[in-house]
Image: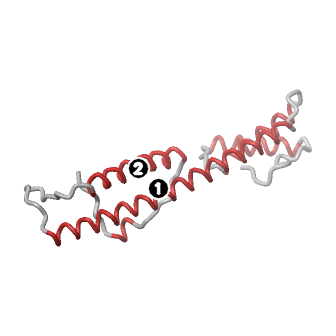
Amino acid sequence: MTIDTATPERQNRYIEPASLIEAEERLLLLKQRKSEIEVQLGDRDRRHPDGQRLDGEEYWAWRHSAIYAKGHAEREILELKRWIRDEKFRGREESRQIRAEMANVNLNDPLSLIAGAHRLLGRLGYDGVQFSDEERSLIASLRYSLRQSHVPPDAGDEGTA
């Protein structure tokens, strides 16, 4: 197995993960890649695919590329760890906010339940959940019903769908 000696321009592009699961999978792959590079760096008897040993100049060029790739992997591991930590913190904060909002919902009052459901649907929309046209229509109907009942649909929440 050999290292990826792609151009520095290609290796320096950090792409933020789309989800916590993606970030954790990438982190695992990068840790494995870094470990593989370290194993290869320990091999002082580097050879070409045809079995011929690398000469001194080729070896040092290869070693330089391997060290660069290892450093890139280490930097991306740090970025992903930071992103995962921040994402988990955001998730805990959102959970606290939702629990606080739901504590204000009167489970015996249908209008209070509808208003709470509307706020929850709005939060899901902000979190990137894609609603179909029918679902968006239902959310708009909820909002309309709440306004007709003189209950502010967005009470306690700045952003709903």
- Contact, mark 1 vs mark 2 (Cβ under 8 Å): yes
Task: Identify the residue at horizontal 33%, vertical 64% (top origin).
Answer: 67
Residue underneath mark 2: 31
Asked whether 61 or 92 is in front, the reply is 61
Using the image, determine if residue 156 lies above or below residue 10. above
Task: Identify the residue at horizontal 37%, vertical 65% (top origin).
Answer: 11
- Left or right, 130 with respect to 119, comes to left
Task: Identify the residue at horizontal 7%, vertical 56% (top origin).
Answer: 50
- For mark 1, give the secondary structure: helix
Using the image, determine if residue 110 lies above or below residue 25. above
- Left or right, 94 with respect to 58, comes to right
- For mark 2, give the secondary structure: helix
Q: Amino acid at mark 1?
A: Ile
Q: Which mark is residue 77?
A: 1
Using the image, determine if residue 122 lies above or below residue 102. below
Q: Amino acid at mark 2?
A: Lys
Task: Identify the residue at horizontal 63%, vertical 47% (top origin).
Answer: 88
